[in-house]
Amino acid sequence: MTRNPRKLKWTKAFRRAAGKEMVVDNTLQFAARRNVPVRYNRDHVATTLKAMQRVSEIRAKRERVFYKSRMAGNKEREKAANRKLVAENEHLLPRVRASERMAEEMEQQTMAEDIAQEVQPQEIVRKQKIKQRLLVGGGVENEMDVD
């Protein structure tokens, strides 16, 4: 029984067609088979191995960027789905008592007042400039500078 590889989720064809894997990238061409025999050359092998490492680094970096761009909106979608779930099943959540709600409101008000007090501008205190003079014996002499 033959099947369409674009419909089987585990195939490369499906992953590329669904946009889950990079399709257009010139680093993918290095993985292609070449059926041309090449005479052994030590320098050629060394440069090939270096190139293979560099290509794998570049491919890994590009795949990370591709994955991050593909997963960019997941957090917002997940939060929206969670909010929807809570809104639909709100009757299953425990109710907050009126006394607890009032205590929370009072706590929020006190926190807001504390923040408002911190935000108010305070008097600017001028710092005095201090002159220091090095002494020959190895000490420091302080002199007050008058503004």
Image (tube, rainbow, N blue to C red):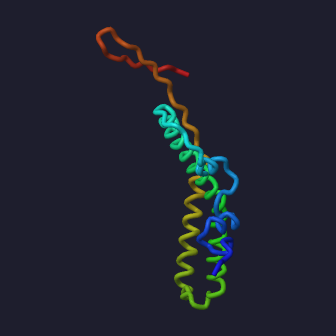
Q: Is residue 68 above or below residue 1?
A: above
Does 86 sit left or right of 133 as displayed? right
Looking at the image, which residue is at 62% across and 73% down?
A: 9
Q: Is residue 72 above or below residue 29?
A: below
Q: Nearer the viewer, residue 83 or 73?
A: 73
Can you say which quadrant of the picture contains the N terminus? Answer: bottom right
Does 106 sit left or right of 42 as displayed? right
Q: Nearer the viewer, residue 122 or 60?
A: 60
Residue 43: x and y in percent read: 48, 31
Can you say which quadrant of the picture contains the C terminus? Answer: top right
Q: Is residue 15 above or below residue 132?
A: below
Q: Is residue 110 above or below residue 133?
A: below
Residue extending furthest top? 136
Q: Nearer the viewer, residue 129 or 38?
A: 38
Q: Nearer the viewer, residue 16 or 131?
A: 16
Residue 92: x and y in percent read: 57, 90
Res. 15 visible in picture:
yes
